Image (cartoon, rainbow, N blue to C red):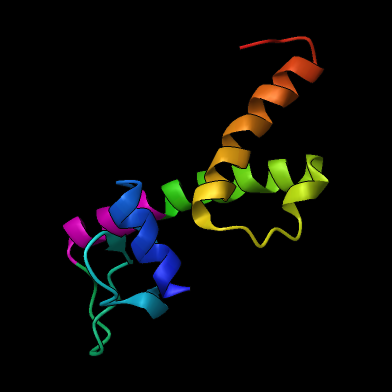
Amino acid sequence: MLGALYWAAAHLDLPTLAGAGYDGAGIGVHTPVEHPADGGDLHIDNRTYNALLRGLHALGERGFALLVGHWRTLRHITASPERIGAIVKAAPTLTHYEYGRPT
């Protein structure tokens, strides 16, 4: 999994959003800032950063859920990240075409 994250960050020039379990994964892999161990509050900058990551993550998850729900081919895909990107780029265009709203 980590190899796919690095590949997307490096080759596609995409910032990669990951969960807290991937903290310290490397350049281009963005993870949320964890709460301090002493139970204190996060600095406002860190809370804002976490909120932005959550918002972007939610948009990506929602978009992928819509595509997976509509396009059966994406339900059990095992292609490389590069090929998945091409399929995901084509799916919204095909969906708009199907509903008579060409982009």
| Quarter containing the C terminus | top right
Depth check: 32 or 51 in front?
32
Measuring from the top left, give residue 97's x and y in whole percent.
74, 16
Query: Would you identify the image quadrant in which residue 26 lies?
Result: bottom left
Q: Residue at x 58, y 49 (%)?
A: 84
Describe residue 24's horizontal placement relative to residue 63 as left or right: left
Overall secondary structure of the magenta section: helix
Residue 76 colored in magenta in the image = no
Specify start and end residues of the magenta stretch as a single range.
43-53
Q: Is residue 88 above or below residue 32?
A: above
Describe residue 35's horizontal placement relative to residue 62 as left or right: left
Q: Does any portion of residue 90 appear in the rendered image?
A: yes
Measuring from the top left, give residue 39's x and y in whole percent.
27, 85
Measuring from the top left, give residue 82's x and y in whole percent.
49, 49
Describe residue 40's horizontal placement relative to residue 73 as left or right: left
Measuring from the top left, give residue 33's x and y in whole percent.
27, 70
